[in-house]
Amino acid sequence: MSRIAPLPAAEAVEKTARTYERVCELLGTESVPEPFLAYGRVPAFLQDFFMNFKKFVVGSGALDEQKRTLIALCVCASAGCDVWANFFTERAKSQGFSDEQIAEALAVASTNYMYNTFFKFRDIAGTDVFEGMSVGLRAHTFHGTGFDDATVELINIAISDMNACKPCVSGHVKKARDLGVKDEAILETIQCAAVMLAGVQYLKAAGV
């Protein structure tokens, strides 16, 4: 049972009701997706999330809509939020991604988790003794999917930032820039991830 019950559309009034309508218009749905009903208990949070979601998650800019979907999917799945991960899985399929491509994106994110764990340890261990030791971790997944290197690096940047791995973030940002990825696209990757992590965190805190 949720600690904070979602606010049904039928009970929403004023700003919340209008935001619910805008959500449905944006997503082309007849009903309000479950997460937004949870956010509806706090109108200011609902409005903030909706506006950020519209601008940085489902919109497009330096980072196209398809890449934003992959970033959001990987972030939400990595954060253990099934409701949003399932939402973006279906969205990815509607944009033409196959089950195999979705699995590959999640595999890239999971492999990055492995490296984040290792390099974050070396960074905070308080000694340089581990710097000269071999990493020893196999990660052929980064080059074994159907995605181009730039897409892989954007996923890696989002997950590395999420895991607060400083050397990983800086390394992947450098590689992305070397590949010709625009700084604006890198920033939008983080903005997309940040928006979804806010949404995920609220759902977890609310027990949804």
Image (spheres, grey):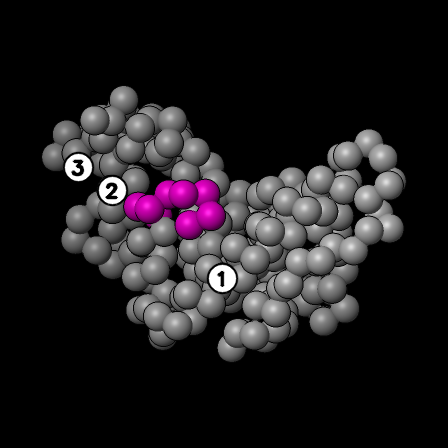
Mark closest to the chain's N terminus, 1 or 3:
3
Which residue position is annotated with label 1?
107
Element assignment for label 1: helix
Tell me whether circle 1 and circle 2 mark residues in contact (CB < 8 Å): no
Instruction: Give the number of the disc on residue 9.
Output: 3
Could you tell me the amino acid type at mark 2? Answer: Glu
117 is higher (above) or lower (below) than 108: above
Q: Residues within 10 Å of mark 1 (few under 14, many from 20)?
A: some
Where's the C terminus, which quadrant?
Answer: top left
Which region shows up in magenta?
A: 77-84
Percent x, y for residue 78?
Answer: 47, 48
Where's the N terminus, which quadrant?
Answer: top left
Does residue 19 appear in the picture of this structure?
no
Instruction: Give the number of the disc on residue 34.
Output: 2
In whole angstroms, how far apart are the C-alphas of marks 1 and 2?
26 Å
For image coordinates 35% across by 70% down, the residue present is 99
